[in-house]
Every structure is written in C-alpha cells, then in structure tokens.
Amino acid sequence: MNKTILLKNRPKGRPTLDDFEFKEIEKPSPKEGEVLLKTKYVSVDPYLRGRMRDEKSYIEPFQLNEPVESGIIAEVIESNSENFKKGDYVNGMLQWKQFQTSNGKGLQKVDGSKAPLSAYLGVLGLTGITAYLGLKKIGDLEKGETLLVSGASGAVGTVVGQIGKIKGCKVVGIAGTDEKIKTIKEKFHFDEGINYKTTDNMKKAIAEACPNGVDVYYDNVGGEILDAAMANINYNGRVVCCGAISLYNKTEQPTGPRHETTLIKKSVLMQGFTVRDYQEEFPAAIQQLATWLQEDKLTYSETIVEGFDEIPQAFIDLFDGKNKGKMIVKV
C-alpha cells in the first residue's frame, strides 16, 4: 500500500482538511539510477500556505490534484544508484507520499549518529539555515546590540534568539502564550519576552523591553507587530523580513502604517529574503550550526505529531500556534 496527499482546493482564508485529499497509489519500483524512498519525517511550514495560491512567487505554486511537497527525511529501502545504498537516510524536497522514487537530484545524506534525524528538518535544516543566514546577510549583528524576534517560540525564532545570545546581544522575543514566553527565557535564554495576546499596547511593550531601542528586528509575523517594532527601531537599524504568518490567510489586502519616513529618517535597512537565495552558503551554515550544537551553545525544540494521515492537520495547527519550535510529522 502507498498513500499520497493531494491539494484538492486552493484555500480561501485559513486552510481546512477539506482542502486536501488522500489517495491510494501504487508503490513504485526504482529504475536504473534511482532509489526507492520511505518517508520517515515530514516538515510542515507556514510558507507552504503561499504555494497553495495560484500566483507567481519565488517558488512554483502547488498544482491542484497533485501531491503537496515539503522537506522530508526518508530512508533508502532500495537503490539502483551508485550514490546511495540501502539504509541511507536522506533529506530533500519530496512529495507527501509514503513511498516514492528519486533520481537523487537534490537529496543530501544525513547522519543520524551525529544528531536525531528530525533535527535535519529543523536546527540543522532549512529552519536553522534560515535563522543563521538571515541574521548574517541582513541583520549583521554586532555585540551589544538589541535583537527583537517575533514568532520567537517557533522553529526559526528560537534559533535566531540563540544566535543573538551567542553574538553577545540583548535578545527580546515575542510569542503568544505565557508558557511560550517562559520557554524562550528559560530554555533558549532570551533576556525578555512579550506575550502579544495579552499586551494592549505593543509599541509601549517593546519600548519597555528594549529601553535602548531595537537595532535588529527579525520578523516572522508581519502585520501590527511589525508596525510596533518599526516604531522602536534605531538609527541604522536592520529589519529581516523572513515571514508574515499573520497575513497568510487574509482574504483582503491588509493596510497599515506607512514606514517610508521611518526608513528614510533613521537610515533603516528593511529587506525580505528567502533562504534559497543563498544556497551556496548552506554547507558553511550547517557546519557552524552543528558546531554550536556540539558545544551546547545551541539547543532546539520540536513538536512531533505521529502518523502520515496527520500531516494536513499538523500544517493547519501552525496557524493556531499549537507548535513549540519545529512542527514535524513522524511517519
């Protein structure tokens, strides 16, 4: 038996289970030069919501009635390729299928003896690389500066905050529950935390948590929290626009404060990026993250949901903030 998960409808607003379809398909056999892969861990990420829209972006949209794809850790169970052997574990952008074949293009071997396999979807995968390169290429953090992070308890945010501490910065995180605030301070060593759901005035709350202003704002949510951060940005501040989860399910064009005068008066750099812009730097980023992990300077948090059939629900749960750290489905 083999199952796949198709995109049945393009979601209008928040995705629902009705937007996905499970389909039983034939288990494939690898051709010459191919491998047969068994899915072990599936990454679900907010950016997948953008690929469900039929619009031009930095990556092709998903097609209706075709499998969804994301980062996956898989086991090689048959190999007709000289580059892989049975028992290897690989990381790649693969389809939501229990079994699938691959010619090996885009697959990277991962070593489960150096870190848990799931870590290669998080802190040692695109999540960690996104945090590292966003700060390096745009944030340009310097010792003693103040780093503000939204979505601070999420997969990217927790790594961003820890890198900030490694760099000798004051780090303030924004998250949605008191429990998450406690976690980012106790486990990930953020200096301060702000619960945006219980804060009436985010502009004031940020000012109080960042008395010297904000030098670097790493934005994972956009919207009103971005507005409040911009009101506290310092001269020569840098804004890393990584995500905008607060806007992904909006059905109308959002409006808000205009930031042009702030950008001009304070000489602020505000730049969006996708981590694939810097693919040539992935190996060095992974090496640095792995070193910090081995030195106990870096830790991580995961929410692991079990069962192939739970993949769509795990994805939907991201928009309710049900994940602590990286959301992963174990198959």
Image (spheres, rainbow, N blue to C red):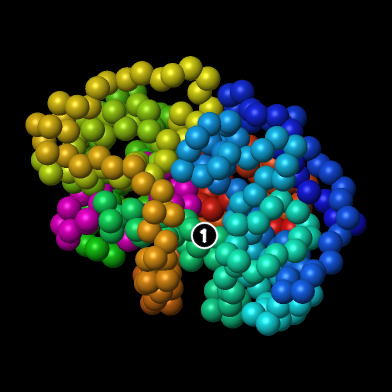
Q: Kindly indicate the quadrant of the structure image that contains residue 203.
A: top left
Residue 21 x/y as whole percent: 78, 37
Residue 47 is left or right of residue 81, and the answer is: left
54 in magenta: no
Q: Kindly indicate the quadrant of the structure image that contains residue 31.
A: bottom right
Please state which amino acid type lies under the numbered disc 1.
Answer: Gly
Residue 250 x/y as whole percent: 50, 23
Residue in view at x 48 percent, y 52 percent: 155
Residue 8 x/y as whole percent: 74, 33
Residue in view at x 70 percent, y 29 percent: 9
| Region in magenta | 139-163
Q: Which corner quadrant holds the C terminus?
A: bottom right
Q: Is residue 98 in view from this perspective? A: yes
Q: Viewer-proximal residue, 79 or 214?
A: 79
Figure check: 121 above or below 90: above
Q: Which corner quadrant holds the N terminus?
A: bottom right
Residue 180 x/y as whole percent: 46, 45
Figure check: 80 above or below 225: below
Residue 3 is left or right of residue 176, and the answer is: right
Figure check: 311 above or below 177: below
**Mark 1 burial class by Cα count in 10 Å: few <14, some 14-19, many 20+:** many
Q: Viewer-proximal residue, 142 or 83?
A: 83
Q: Is residue 117 in view from this perspective? A: no
Figure check: 311 above or below 298: above
Residue in view at x 42 percent, y 71 percent: 283
Label 1: element kind: loop
Task: Check disc 1 and report the residue beneath it.
Answer: 122
Residue 264 is left or right of residue 329, and the answer is: left
Q: Viewer-proximal residue, 91 or 296?
A: 91
Residue in view at x 39 percent, y 54 percent: 277
